[in-house]
Amino acid sequence: MGRTLEHDGRDERLDALADHLEVLGFELSGPETDALTAERDRVVRLLRGVVGRTAEPAAPLLVVVAGGSGAGKSTTVNTLAGAPVSAAGVIRPTTRTPTLVCHPGDRAWFASGRVLPDLQLRIADSDAMPRGVALLDTPDIDSVELVNHRLAAQALDAADGWMWLATSRTYADEVGMTYLRRARERQALIVLAVTQVRPHERAEVLDDADRLLAAERIDPDLRTDIPHAEVADDQLPGDAVAALRDWLAALAPEDRRVAVRAAATAGVVAALPSELGTLQEAVVQERRAAERLRAAVREHYAALPTQLDAELEAGLSLRADVLDRWQRLVGGNEAMLRVQTVIGQVGDVVRDRLGRPGQQDTRQVQVEVAGELTRIVTRLLEHTAAATRRDLEADPVGREVLDADPDLRREDPERPVRVREAIARWETDVSERIETVGGPRKEQARRRSTALNAVATTAILVLFTLSGGLTGGEVGIAAAASAASQWLLVRMLGEQNVKRLLDEIGADLRHRVGELAEADQARLEAAIEAASPPADAAAALASAAVSASVAASPSAPGRAADGSR
C-alpha cells in the first residue's frame, strides 16, 4: 500500500497551491475567462478537499456513482440502499440534485458540510448501507444541462472511490472514457459496472469492455455487470447488485478505509501536474499577452520625445504685438548697448532697460510662452494616449484591460493642470539657473533682481529661436527679437555660459514633459499588470505542484504488497 499523506508539510503545500490559484482572475484570457475561472475553482476545491480528507483518515468513505444518461445510477443506488431513496424515471436527466445515501450512524459526518461544502445535496440514510461507506448519486455526465456536468465533476473530485456505470451500448462512449482517463491519472479506486446486460450478449460485452480498459491502461478494482431485469419500486432484484454490495462491504473496515483514503489522496496529489496543465498554460499565455500590450504602450510613448522636438521646431506661435514690444524692450537702442562694453556697466544697462518699465511686457511674453507650451504638450500627450487606446481597443485582450477600468477610455481631466504646473516649474527653474550661472557676473544678476525675470524670459525666447521654433505675425519681428536677446544674454552671462544654459534649460523642459508622459504610461501599464497574473505565477504553480506531489506514492491505490487490491 502507498504511503499516506500525513501532516508532514504536504497539507500546507496543498493549501499554498490553492492560495496561488485563488488569486488568478484570468482577466486577459478573453472568451476563455469563464471556463478558466471554473477550472480554477474546481482545482481549488480538489486541493482543499484533499487537505480535509487527510485530516480525518478514518472518516467514512465517499463513493461517487457516476455515468451517462440512462445507465441506471439511481436504480442501482436504490437497490443497494434497499429503498427508493433516489428518484429514477424515464425523463432525462433524472438526477438533478445529487443524493447521498449512508448508514444512519454516518449521517452526522456527511451533514456537517466537511465533505462537499459547496454542493447542495439531499441526504438519505439506510440500514442496508455498510457503516463507513456512503454512495453519492450524481447527475448524468452527458446531460444537455451544463450545470449537471459541473455538479458531476465536483462530486467526482471529492470522491474516495468511483463507481462507474455504463450500459452495454454506452460503455465505450468517449464522454465516459474522458472521466475514466482522469481516474487513471489520479490512480483512483474504480469499480466499473456494465448495466442492462442481456444473457446472450454478456460474454461478448464484457470481453470487449476488458479489451477497451486494457487499451486505455485503466485497471479497475472491480469490473462487473448488472443484468437486464425488471425494475420494481425503482429497484432491481437484490442479487443483481450482489458484487457491488460485497465490494462496498469490503471497504467498510477502518484499516481499509484508511488505506483507501490515503491512496486516493496520494493519487490526486500525484496527478497535480496534469490537473494544473490547463491553468498553467493559461497563465503563460496571459503573461505573453500582457507583455504584448506593454510593448504597444511603450512603443507609443517612446516616440513622444521625437514628436515633442518636431512640435517645438514647428514653432511657438506668439502674437506679433507681444514680440514687437519685446523687440523694442531689448533691442530698441542697440547702438547704445553695443558701446557699453565695460562689464561693470552691463548691470546698469539691464536695470535701466529691463527693470520696472518693462515688467508688464516681460509678463506678457511669459504668459504667451507658457500658454503655448501648455497647449503643445497637452495636445501631444492627448494624441499619444488616444493612439495607445486605439491599439488596445484593437486587441481583444487590450479591450479586457480597458473594460476593467472605464476611466482609461476617458481623457484625464487633470492633465492640462499638471502640464501648466510643469511648465511653470520649468520657468522658475530657468530663473534659478540664471542666478547661478556666469561666474562673477552672477553677483551682478542677483543684485539686479528686478531684471531677473526679463533675463530668464530672454533665455527662453533664445532657446526657441535657435531651433527655429519661434514664429509670429512677422518673421522680421522674431528675428530682431532673437538677435537682440542673444546679444543681451552673451553680454550678461558670457558666451560659454549662455551655450551651457540653453542646453540645460532645453534638456530640463524635455525631462519635465517626459515625467508627464511617464505618468500616463505608468497608469496604463499598472492597469495591464493589475489584470495579468503575477510574474512568477506559472513558476510558482509548477513548483508547488511538484513539491506537493513528490511525496505521493507511485504505486497503484489500495494495492497490497503482493499486488492484490
Image: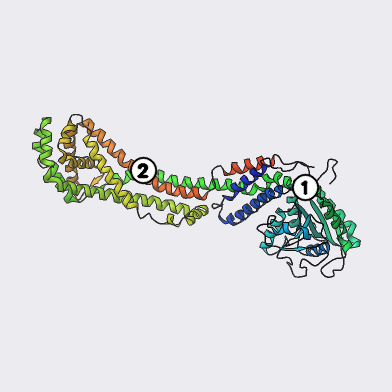
Report the mark closest to the observer, 2 or 1. 1
Which disc is residue 514 wearing? 2
Residue designated by label 1: 258
Name the kind of residue labelled 1 in the image.
Val
Q: Is residue 557 above or below residue 69?
A: above
Question: Image quarter for residue 233?
Answer: bottom right
Q: How many marks?
A: 2
- Kind of element beneath mark 1: helix
Q: Nearer the viewer, residue 71 or 123?
A: 123
Asked which secondary structure carries label 2, the reply is helix
Q: Residue 18, image x and y in percent?
A: 62, 48
Question: Residue placed at 24% from the left, 36% from the top?
Answer: 433
What's the residue at 67%, 42% (across, down)? 10
- Residue extending furthest right? 200
Residue 306 shown left or right of residue 197 in the figure: left
Q: Residues within 10 Å of mark 2 (few under 14, many from 20)?
A: some
CA separation in Å, label 2 and label 1: 66 Å
